[in-house]
Amino acid sequence: MNFHDAYAVLDGKFRKKVEEEGSEYIPLIPPERPVDFVLIAKEPSLGFVDGSKGNPSSEVHEKRIRGLKNFAWSFEDFMLHFCIREFLCQRQESYYLTDLAKGAMTVNAASQSPFDRYEDWYELLQMELGLVATPVAKIISVGTDVSKFLTGKCVHGHSGTIMHYSGRAVARAGVEIPGNKEAWDQFHPKSEHVLEVAGKVMDEASMGQLSDEILSRLQKGSGITEPRRRLMFDYKIRFERIRDPDNLGWPRYRECWDISSEPG
């Protein structure tokens, strides 16, 4: 069985388990081959669902039919993709974004017994990592709950943790600024670069016309606000530290380091 067929079988197992627990399934963006970096968050959010329509399942189904993928909806989703591609991966290195639990749910539902849910999904996570991660891949937890769980399981390759990009987390961003003040003063990422990556991600994920609608919505948004800039800087420092603790690198988007440039 080739890699793509094996991933399709695994995806089927995800779908079945999500159906059994009564939540909603949003497919992940499958990798082309085993990757160098795997980032693991908690569970998909139903934050994109319009509650006024009264039928979350119908809305998720409609968007899924049109190509919706997990980690490909919000500006923060694509900020993370941008930072991974800019500050973590080099040359032909690849990455994969996933969740510990695969069932999409509301924030309130997700707060109920999360570690029991993670334990329930752990066997499938092991299968997933066995398929999508190279033997020397670095595993990065997204958020403290995931970090605690993976640390408790002594997951091979667990190399560090980054803050989640939820609204509450963004408000607390900037923890890496005090120790890296000069770099922070020169850090001015551009909104258009994040949107460019967003387009590439959605093209790679074959999201079709839905990607045009998402891009249109993102272009009308607020772009890289100051809290988002702080979070991106935290990601930059953490990623550079994870990939090479002894040698902080330089980004490919040199404009991010142009002290004369204005924030996007």
Image (spheres, rainbow, N blue to C red):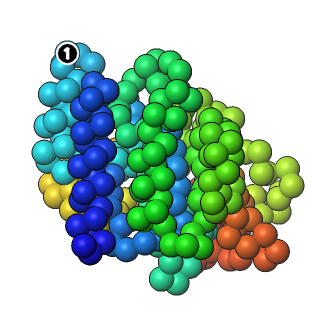
Image-based side of 23 in relation to 185, left or right: left
**Foreground residue, 60 or 147?**
147
Left or right of 65, for residue 163: right
Mark 1, secondary structure of its residue: loop
| Residue at the image point whose x is 52% and y is 27% from the top | 116
**Quarter of the N terminus within the rendering:** bottom left
Q: Position of residue 115 (x, y in %)?
A: 56, 29
Is residue 187 at all visible to an observer of this figure?
no
Residue 168 in sight in this render: yes
Percent coordinates x, y for residue 34 in the rendering? 43, 72
Q: Position of residue 33 (x, y in %)?
A: 37, 74
Q: Give whichever of 175, 59 is nearer the camera.
A: 59
Residue marked by disc 1: 54
Toward the right, the furthest residue is 179
Horizontal and vertical percent for residue 219? Answer: 35, 50
Q: Is residue 88 left or right of residue 18?
A: right
Q: Nearer the viewer, residue 114 or 229?
A: 114
Residue 169 relative to residue 106: left or right: right
- The quadrant where residue 152 appears: top right
**At x 60% / y 49%, what residue is drawn?**
141
Q: Residues within 10 Å of mark 1 (few under 14, many from 20)?
A: few
Name the amino acid type tagged 1: Gly
